[in-house]
Amino acid sequence: MSKTVEAIRCLSHDTVSLFIRVLCFSSALIFAAFASSACRGDEQHGFAGQVAPLFQNFCVKCHGTDEEDTQLALHQISATMDAPLQLANWSKILTRLQLGDMPPADERQPPRDDRERAIRWIKAELDRAGGRADAGEAKLRQFAYGNLVDHESLFHSTLEVAIPAEPRLWRLSPSIYEQLVNDAGGDSRSIAQPFALGPGGGIKDYAAAFVVDEPTVTQLLRNAGEIVAAQTRDKQDKETNETVVFGNAPKQFRALVETQGGPTGGQIEEALHYQFDRILQREPTADELAGFTALMRKNIRDAGAARGVRATLAAVLLLPEAVFRLELGQGPPDKHGRIMLSPRELAYAVAYALTDERPDGQLLKAADEGRLATRDDVRRELERLWQDPKTKKPRIPRFFREYFGYHRAPDVFKNDKDVKQYSGRFRAEILVNDTDQLIEWILKRDQNVLKELLTTNRSFVNYRVDSKKGPVLAHDKNHMELAYNVAIDEWTKDQPMELPREERAGILTQPSWLVAHSDNTHTHPILRGKWVRERLLGGTVPDLPITVDAQFPDAPEQTIRERLAITKDSYCWKCHQQMNSLGLPFEAYSHLGEFRKLEPVLDLQATAANVDSKGNPRGDVLREVEVDPSGVISRSGEQGLDCEVKSAVEMIHRLADSDRVRQVFVRHVFRYFMGRNERPGDGPTLIAADKAYVESGGSFKGLVISLLTSDSFLYRQLPSQVARQ
């Protein structure tokens, strides 16, 4: 560790303490609602009145004496929670009830009020006994569990107004932090990223999903030292060849080390004003000026001018505003117990909704002048940013990458021997770029966006624009023949190209998506079907039990459809019935994304006979079997949607016309821009957003602006009100 970083660790103790206090304050706000809810737990009825009847009517059929393999006998569970095993059992029961997977989806379900009363009683008792009452809630705050909120309760809500989330701190995303570092005068390429969004697919940047733990704080300390070192670089005097301390620093910083006898109070304040503006885009308060001035003098006295100044300037980079997005609200609550975000909070919320950059001058000026205090004010600024061609809006295309997951195609290794007859090398990044361009093309038109994304037979094929030559091949021509079934002489600069309608329909038949939802050597109808179930139909597939080894049977002489027959075992079918029939239509596409009518499998007899004169095997012999691309839309939740389909294209077109699919898409857009899962209290927001999308002719811009001017975005709810949901 460098001496500078060590000095920062020692000298910025007050700042780090403030940082931790604000973090704890945020945690208290986030969990206050749950504690409040638990305390209201219908004690007058207790276990006998609220919990035991639910177990008897809906649970003991499977969790009773008749089930030999049951791990939890609910017909005789004790209402007390005084032993570790009892606490563990009750925590398990609570989690299953909260996640909605007990009873299973295909069993009779208890009324919602009965379930919620049981949950409140169990939580209250677990809190009293010191057990885990938050495990299920922690999962429900993760993206993968968003669909567990009942769809009908959201889009048929009778609430007068939306009940937003509670106040929160939202940790900066890696992209926003990189931009902050560059804006501060550092170089994001030369520092370690302290934040990460985790592996896996789906929407990543959830406000409640990540914490600032000790390793993160340690890295932030190191980065602060590196950033300030870049701000205050020394230089060599060309004439004297002597080192000029802070020679490349702004004049406000140079004055702190050049003044004989130490800097004056005015010079310190001027330097602090500069640093606060550079890092936080605001003036320091009177208390901050006083505190940081005292810290600066102490640091200079203890560590010398250069180190002392650098340590104090680095402390500004550790203030909560440099690490978190503050969404606490300001002012008195309205009659519904809601507090509107402050103008400055709204400025950052609007900027970070569309961009990775901090608010521009116009946004901050509007906030400072009181012109960012109403829904119409926010709409005005959103429209301005959206229409400004100079404003980079990476958050928009990033949503589609995270929603569809096609950008993960390069992560799926492909053996070059599978493509040697084409280009000899599989270039998945080219496929991703083609899909990026197709989405950009659809968004520019901004009409019927979801339907176009799902059904268009147009595609960019092996295409990029050279600054001098214009449209050119992104890779050699053989590559496009492999992925798109496009002959070499068919490639054109006039793109997107029109592909056969019976073969391609939107993003789900783009080679990038098909490759991303495959494995190294095979297609993967389970992954593909799971995506359709969760991202289009809004269903839920339970977590894979840790006791299950989820591998394709090693039977290369069988088709993938034949191998999946093993999942029809009763234990497996509970989950696989939700995925297989939706994923098998995509068997019309290989694991490389090409459309096919024949699937190669191992010919056992021919392989056994394929030997040389000495009887040594010469290798595998394959035979081709006709692909069966049929499937079934089932358990969709929409009357008239369930049916048998003959192909993936037919299935996709049916889904694209579905009201439920459109509403599920709205739910995912909500999650991305709100940074959290929707809750029953967000029903009015979702209904209004869906209406805005339909009435605007399927405009993605109309949908997003509706969400970003909604009560769920603009307001925060007092914890006592959130607890009533």
Image (cartoon, rainbow, N blue to C red):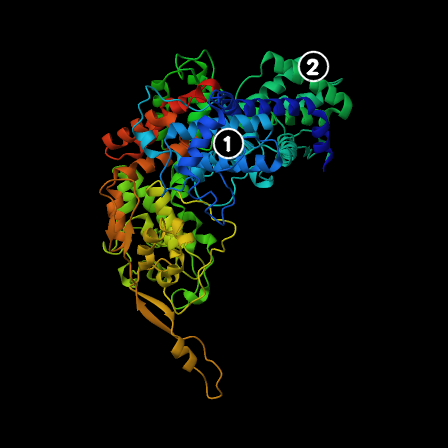
The answer to whether 331 is drawn above or below residue 185 in the figure is above
The answer to whether 567 is drawn above or below residue 311 in the figure is below
* Closest to the observer, 3 or 270: 3
Res 313 → quadrant: top right
Res 361 → quadrant: top left
Quarter in which the N terminus is drawn: top right
Foreground label between 2 and 1: 1
Residue 327: give x, y in percent of width and height.
Answer: 48, 23
Q: Residue 502 carries which label?
A: none
Quarter in which the C terminus is drawn: top left
Say if mark 2 contacts mark 1, CB within 8 Å.
no
Q: Which of marks 2 and 1 is nearer the N terminus?
A: 1
Q: Residue at x 36, y 57 (%)?
A: 593
In the rendered image, is residue 153 in sight?
yes
Q: Residue 264 carries which label?
A: 2
- Secondary structure under the numbered disc 2 in the rendered image: loop
Q: Which residue is the site of mark 1?
A: 208
Residue 566: give x, y in percent of width and height.
Answer: 40, 60
The three-letter amino acid code for the residue at tag 1 is Ala
Neighbours of disc 2 within 10 Å: few (<14), some (14-19), many (20+): some
The three-letter amino acid code for the residue at tag 2 is Thr
The answer to whether 372 is drawn above or below residue 178 in the figure is above
Q: Residue at x 26, y 42 (%)?
A: 451
* Closest to the observer, 48 or 247: 48
Neighbours of disc 1 within 10 Å: few (<14), some (14-19), many (20+): some
How many discs mark residues in the rendered view?
A: 2
- Secondary structure under the numbered disc 1 in the rendered image: loop
Residue 348: give x, y in percent of width and height.
Answer: 46, 25
Residue 89: give x, y in percent of width and height.
Answer: 54, 38
In the rendered image, is residue 430 in sight?
no
